[in-house]
Image: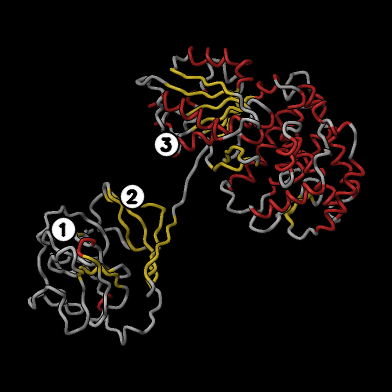
Amino acid sequence: MRLKKSQNFEPQVIYKWSIATRSPVPRTAKHWSTPCSGVQLGGQVSAWAGEGCVMWIPVVLHPHKESQECTGWRSSHEEPVGTSKTRPPLPTPGHPEPLKSTSKAPSYRRSLNRETLPSGSMPVSEEAFAPVALATVPQEPRQTDFQLVRVKSTWCRIKKGEDLSDCEDKITLSEAKIGECISESGISWTIEAPIYFCYKVVETYNILDPSNTTLLWGHITDPQQLELATSGKRKLRRFIVIDEVVDELYGSKVREYFEENNVQHKILALPTTEETKSMDLVLDILQEVQKFSIDRRTEPIIAIGGGVCLDIVGLAASLYRRRTPYIRVPTTLLSYVDASVGAKNGVNFLQCKNKLGGYTPPVASFLDRSFIQSIPRRHISNGLGEILKMALMKHKGLFDLLKSHGKYLLDTKFQSYSGSANHGDAALQTTRIAIETMLEELAPNLWEDDLDRLVDFGHLISPELEMRVLPSLMHGEAVNIDMAFMTYVAHTRGLITAEEKEQIIQCMRGLELPVWHSGCSWPLIKRALMERLKHSGGQPRMPLPTGLGVAEIFNDTSEETLERAYKLWVRDCKTVLEEEPAAL
C-alpha cells in the first residue's frame, strides 16, 4: 500500500486552487482571481488525485504587492500575470513527467492504486486528462464509494471492494463508508457511520446489600475490562444523583453500601419532579460533576430515583464531555417498566413535556422490585398505566394477567411472596412481559427513525393534558386517560367491539386508573393532535387497538369520528370521583 508523498513547493509562492472534475480544465478556461493577500501559501502542500477524486490545481504565480490582484490563466496563448515563459508545460495525457519528489515527509503504505507524483507537479487523476469532445458538454455525475481503513494510527479511504492483500501493516476496517459524487456543479460527500450501543437491563434483588456488587461491576460486559476493574489497582469513584424523597428512605443504605465497598463517592440529593424537570437542574448536576472530576469512561454516573430523576441525569450525562456513561436504578413501578429500559432522556421546556432531550441509553439499568414496596398505592397504579399500554398494544396474555391479578398487584406492591400460590408470581410475570414487549418495540428503533410506534399509544394527548393540569395528574394517569379516549375512537371506527371496549375500561377501573378528566376538553384534544402533526412528519400516526392485545397505526381518522367518540366517552366515563384523581 503506497501513500503519495507530499509535494514540496518553494516558500513565498502564491497559489490559486481550482477544482477539476472528470474533464480537464481547458487552457482557454477562465478562473476566478483573488487578492494576493488572501491566497498566500507556503511550505508543503499535500493533495490526492486519482480516479473519481477532486483534482486540486496549483496555479503558480510570483508574489505581488498586496494591493495588486493575482489573476490566473485567461486564454490558451496568455501566460499567468508576472510569470516567465519558462513555466514547465502541463503533462501530456497519460504521460506525466517522471521526476522524483524532494519532500522529506515520511512515506506510508496505503492501498489506493495511486502513483507517487513528482515534486512540484499537479496531482491529477488519469481520468482528469481523458479526452473530451467539448468542455461545455454536460457530464454525468460520477459516484465513487469508499471504505475506511486504519493503517497503524491513520484512517485512509479506499475504493469499496479494493483488495487489501498487499498491505504489510496491520489494518482495521471500519463499517463507516464515504460516498463521493462529482458533477459539473461541484462535489458532495455522503457519510454512512453506524452508531453502536450496547446496554444491559438487569433484574436483581437487594441491590444496596454491600455484598451485592451489581452496582459496582454489573455494567461491564467485557471479561478483560471486568478483570482490570476488579484488580484493585485503582480506587473506585462514583458520582450518585438521588431523588431527595428516595434519599430520605434509602440514603443511609446508599452511603453504607459505598463506604463498605471502599468507594470514594459524592451523593447529590435533588428534588426531581415534573415541576423541577428543567435545564437549570441539569446544569446544577453538571457543576457538581465537574467539581468531582469523574473519569468520562470508567466512572459512570449513577441515577437513583423515579422516571424524572432518570431522565434528568441521562441528559446531564449525555452532555458532559459529549457522552459520559451512566447507570439507571429505578425506584418506582413506572420507571421500572418504562423510563429505565429505553434510550431517551430529556427535560421540560416552555411548559412542554420533554421538549429538550436526546437518545443516549445508559450502560445499564438495574431493576430491584424491593424499592417499589416503599411507594404509595397511587404510584403503583400510575405504573400500571404504562404496563396496560403494552398489554393493549401487543400482548393479550398480559392484559389477562392485569384483569385477573390487578388488585392483588396493588395490594402486594409487586412483591413476591412464598404463600401466593393462587396467583403464581404475578408480579414477576407482569414486569417481565412488560419489559420484554417494550424492548421488542424500542430496540430496533432507539432513535425513532421510524415514527410509526405502537409505544406512542396513550401519548398523543397526554403530554398536553399532563402539563396543562400539572400537578393534579401523574404521568401514567394522563396516559391512561388518553388511552381511554382512544379506546372509544377505536370502537367508533369499528376496530373493536362494544364488549372489548367495556373490558378495557373495566380493567382500567380495576387498576384504579382514571378514565376521564375535566381538563381533557375537546379544544385541548384538537390542540394536542395538531401538535402531534408537527413532530410526526405531518401524519397523526395514531396507534389504536384492533382487538385485545393487537393494534395498528392509522392516519385516516376524521375529525368527525374523533368528535363523535369524544361525546360518547364523556357520556360514559365522566364521574365526580375522576374529577379529583389526586384523592385516589
Label 1 sits on residue? 42
Is residue 383 at all visible to an observer of this figure? no
Mark carried by residue 172? 2
Quarter placement of the N terminus: bottom left
Spatial distance from mark 2 to mark 3, Cα to Cα?
26 Å
The front one of 421 and 404 is: 404
Q: Is residue 90 left or right of residue 153?
A: left
Q: What is the x, y in percent for residue 313?
A: 54, 31
Categorize mark 3 by other alpha carbons within 10 Å: few (<14), some (14-19), many (20+): few
The front one of 484 and 462 is: 462
Q: Is residue 35 left or right of residue 358?
A: left
Going from the N terminus, do you reach mark 1 or mark 3 first? Answer: 1
Label 3 sits on residue? 321
Q: Which amino acid, by three-letter code, is at mark 3?
A: Arg
Furthest residue to the front?
67
Q: What is the x, y in percent for residue 464?
A: 72, 43
Query: Image quarter for residue 274?
Result: top right
Spatial distance from mark 1 to mark 3, Cα to Cα?
36 Å
Identified at 71% across, 53% down, the residue is 530
